[in-house]
Image: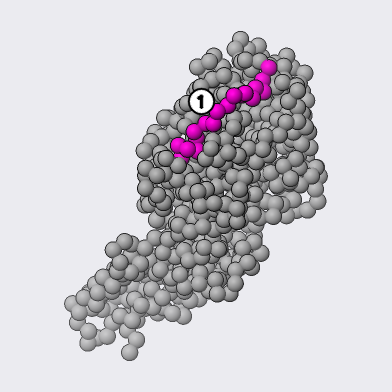
Amino acid sequence: MRNRFHYQPRYFLYWLLLFALGRAVFLLYHWSQHTAALDAGTAARTFLYGLRLDGSAAAYLSLPAFLLLTLGGLFPRWRGAKALGAYTALAGVVVGLMTTVDLELYKAWGFRLDSTPLQYLDTPGEMAASAGSAPWLKLTLILAGLLAAGYGLYRRLLAPLPLAPAWFPRWRAVLVGLLYIALVIVPLRGGVQQIPVNQSDVYFSAQFPFANHAAINVPWNVVQSLQLGEVKQSTTVYLPDSTARRLVSELYRPAPDPAPVQLLRTARPNVLFIILESFTAKLVGHLGGEKDVTPTLDSLARTGVSFSNFYASGDRSQKGIVALLSGYPNQPTTSIIKYPRKTEGLPSLARSLGRQGYQSAFYYGGELAFANMKSYLLAGGYQRLVERQDFSQRDQNSKWGAHDHVLLGRLLRDLRQPRPAPFFVTAFTLSSHEPFEVPMRPRFPGADQDALFRNSVAYTDHALGQFLRAAQQEAWWANTLVVLVADHGHVSPGWSAIQAPEKFKIPLLLTGGALRPELAGRQVAAFGSQTDVAATLLTQLGLPARDYAWSRNLLAPGPAAAPGGFAFYCFSDGFGMLTPDGELTMDNVAHQLIYRAPAVKDRQLRQGQAYQQESFADFMRR
C-alpha cells in the first residue's frame, strides 16, 4: 500500500534524477569543446562517480522536506502538500538557475560554479558586462526546460502527498520520520567513512579533467566553497615540507652573472606599465599566433625587446595584476586579492619605486572596486587612481566603462602635465574583455565568440599604436621605459583546455626611448611568468628586488636547477610547469598528472609540486 512513509525515498530519488538531468545537459552543452573527446565509458562514469556528490546534495535538500513530513506525522489529516510543494519549487528554481549559470561560466572560466561570483556582487554593472556575450536566449530556454522537467517529474513521482494509514499511531509515524532523517545523514556525508565526501571522491580520470569536472554536483560545490572560503590546503601537499622548501630555493638560487644585461641608457627612467586585457599569444604574430591581429605589438617586437616564452600566472585579471605588480604567485582555489589583510603585506612596485621618488598612478576605464582591486592598489602605494567615475558620461561608451582609446587619450593628456619627479604609471585596458563590443568596424569576419574576441584585440592593439605614436612626440618619451604585458591569456580562439599552456602564453614587450637603440629586435628565450616582471624591472633600475621572493630576473642566467628558466601557472585546482624540456600539468584534487611531455624528467615534476605546495603555504601563513 502506498503511504506517506514511502514518500521520503521517492523524494530523495527525485533530486537524484534532476541532478542526472543537469549533468546530461552539461555534457551536451559542452559537446563540441569537450564532451566529444570523451569515449562513451568515460562519459557514463561521470554519472556513476558523480552519484556520491549528487547523493550528498540530495540529502541536504531532502532534510527540510523530511522534517515537514515528520511534523505531519503528528497530524494525520494534514497533507502538507502546499508547504512541501512550495519548498520544492523554490529549491528547484535555485538548482535550475545554478545549473544554467554554470553552463556558460564553465565555458569562460574552466571550473564549475562555486562561490567565486559572490566577490563581484558589489559591482553588478561589471558583472553584467562580463556576461554580456552569453547566449541568453539559449540559456533561458534551457532553464525553462529544466524547470518544466522538474515540475513534470514532481507531478509524476511525488504528487499528491498521500495520507498516513489510519491504523498507524502518531508516535510511530514520528519515529519513522525521525528514522528517515537519521538515515539521510549517510548520503549527506557521502558514506560511513571517517572523512566526509569531497571533490576528490568523484575525480576518476587522469586523462580528461573535463570528465572529473562533469562529475561534480554544482549546488554541492557552491555550498562547500562557501563553507571553506575556497581555501583547501590539503589538496596541495605533495612532499615533505623540508624537501619542498629546498627545491623551491634551488629554483631561485641565482647563477653567476659575470656580464649583467643592461637594457637602459638612463639610470632613472619613467616607467609606463600597460596591462593588456586578455591578450593571448594565440593572437600575437611574433609569438607564433595569428598574423595581422596585433600589428602594433609585432612591430614593437622588431624595435624593442620581446620575451618569447612568457606565461600568465593565472587565468583572471585580479590574479594577473597581483603577479605583475607584487611578483606574487597565484593560488589554485582562491585569490589573495580577496584578503586585504594578506595583500597589505605584499611587496609592490608602486611602493618600491615610490621610495626612490617616483610618482605613481593607476588608470582604468572601469570600476576599480571590481574584484577588490582598489583596496589592493591603495595598500600597494599608488598615489593616484583614475577610474570610471573620473571619465565624463559621454566617454563611458563601453559596458565596462571607458573604451581603450578614451583611456589612453586621457593618459596621454595627463602625462603632458609638468612632473618634477620620474613617474611610474600603470594603465589597464578593458575593451578586449567580454562582451567584446568595440567602437571600430570589424576587421575580421564572423559573429561568433572567436571573431568578436579577435576584433576586440585588434581594436586595442590599434588604440595602443595610436597612443604610442603620439607619445613619441612628447618630451618625456626619451626618458621612458614602456612595459607591455597581458593580465592573462584566453580560451579563445579555438577553446583551449583550461590547463593547456597555450591558454596561458602571453606577450611581454619592452619599448620606449629609454631603451638602448642597439638592442632593437632582441628576443629573450628564457622561460618566465608574470611573477618575474618585478625582479626584472627593478634589476634594470639598479634597485634591490629581495622583497620579491617569488620573482627572478629574466635577463640573468637561469639557476642550475632550471638553466633555461621556468614558468609556473595555476588553474582551478591544478598547476602547470614549463621549462625548455617541455610542460607538465597536474590535478591537485586527484594528485594525478594530466599531461607530461616525454622529455620532462622526474625532477621537474617534483619542482612543480614543491612550488605549488610552498607558494600556497606562504599564502596561508600571511
- Counting from the top left corner in percent of width and height, residue 54 is at 43, 68
Please give the range of residues in magenta: 248-265
Of residues 124 and 572, which is closer to you in this image?
572
Three-letter amino acid code of the residue under disc 1 = Ala
Whether residue 393 is visible, yes or no, is: no
Q: Which residue is mark 1?
A: 545
- Counting from the top left corner in percent of width and height, residue 415 is at 67, 19
* SS category of the residue bearing label 1: loop
Residue under the image location 34 percent in, 76 percent down:
8
In which image quadrant can residue 202 be found? bottom left
Residue under the image location 57 percent in, 55 percent down:
596
Structural crowding at the residue carrying mark 1, measured as other residues with C-alpha within 10 Å and reported as few (<14), some (14–19) or many (≥20): many
Vertical comparison of 561 with 300: above or below: below
Of residues 375 and 342, which is closer to you in this image?
342
Residue under the image location 60 percent in, 35 percent down:
366
Would residue 308 be found to the left or right of residue 313 on screen?
A: right
> Magenta stretch containing residue 264, yes or no?
yes
Residue under the image location 57 percent in, 19 percent down:
542
